[in-house]
Image: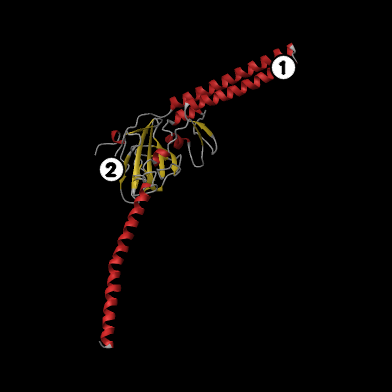
Amino acid sequence: MTESQQNRVLTHLNYCFYEKATIPFARLLFKLLCCFILLSSLVACSSRNKPAPVINIYGNETKNSHVKSNIYSPEYKVRNGETLYSIAWRANSDVRQVAKLNNLSPPYRIYPGQKLFLTAKGNSLSKRKTSKASSGKASNKKQNKSSNFTTPKTVKKTIASSKKQAYAANITGQKSSNQKNYYNQSFSQKIRRWQWPVNGKIIDRFSTAAQGNKGLNFAGSRGSSIKATANGKVVYAGSALRGYGRLIIIKHNDDYLSAYAHNDKILVKEQQQIKAGDIIARMGDSGAQSVMLHFEIRFRGKSVNPLKYLPKK
């Protein structure tokens, strides 16, 4: 065998044992790598303790984001940018009831850091604490007085305190009667005519479920005009309520409110008088995933189905 023939044989053997042998080995490595990736993904999925967040009509917020914005506690501390109407809205309460619990009279001015009672329970608990504290102070004073007892001084102080109580009682009685008169003199509870806030398609309707939609959702294009559904006064215009984006609340009378959420631009100011059909905002997607209008009507603080009030199309 010549030297050239030997070289050919060696070359052929090298090809058979090395290059051909590496092909099945590479395939084996590829299969092992695929199995490892699959197992890793399964372990990652099984280690999740909470379900993945669900995106709903409220956009980049999770399904119960508007529920989280609600207030369920009997007491609440006012934050910057809030009004009594927006707080009552979140508490699903009538603003008059909240005002009465906190001895507030129109125009219901509140300030950041102020503590508000939202239920009669919260108010009664506070009164109990106050009465306990005052009774403790009174008992201490009584003990001090008994140690330095003098009959004339005691009689004089008792008369002074009784006069003071009578004066305070007259003031509180006068205050409560003024509040009652205000509620009786408020404008008519009857709304002659409601009108549609937009002409868009309804994409989600009112639901009575606990976490259901509390109004109507309308599809539309950015910048479309949003109109007031009835005559009234703007009592809130801002973005402090989570899940609603840029929001407008209009008071139509002491019983009815309407709300317009996810606006791109608000065109009205608080305390501004509005007529039915006035353009109050431009449609947008603030606090939502797509351009839409979320519209609500509330009767004495409670959500009602707007379709029962709006004219039939």
Name the kind of residue labelled 1 in the image. Answer: Lys
Asked which quadrant contains residue 8, the reply is bottom left
State the residue in front, 301 or 62: 62
Element marked by disc 1: helix
Residue at image position (29%, 39%) is: 205
Instruction: Give percent across and percent down for residue 176.
Output: 51, 23
Say whether disc 2 or disc 1 marks the residue closer to the N-terminus: 1
Q: Is residue 187 left or right of residue 158?
A: left
Answer yes or no: is residue 284 visible. Answer: no
Percent across and percent down for residue 13 are 27, 77
Q: Does residue 310 appear to the left or right of 60 in the view shown?
A: left
Q: Residues within 10 Å of mark 2 (few under 14, many from 20)?
A: some
Residue assigned mark 2: 202
User: Looking at the image, which residue is at 42% across and 39% down?
Assistant: 68
Residue 128 at x, y percent in the picture: 55, 23
Give amino acid for label 2.
Ile
Q: Which mark is residue 145?
A: 1
In the structure shown, which secondary structural element does the residue marked by tag 2 occupy? strand
Quadrant of res 114: top right
Q: Nearer the viewer, residue 90 or 4?
A: 4
Instruction: Single out the residue that lies furthest toward the top.
Output: 151
> Which residue is farthest left?
313
Image quarter in which the N terminus is found: bottom left
Instruction: Indicate the quadrant containing the C terminus: top left, top right, bottom left or bottom right.
Output: top left
Tag of residue 252 = none
Question: Residue at left 73%, top 11%?
Answer: 151
Query: Within the image, what quadrant is residue 270 found in?
Result: top left
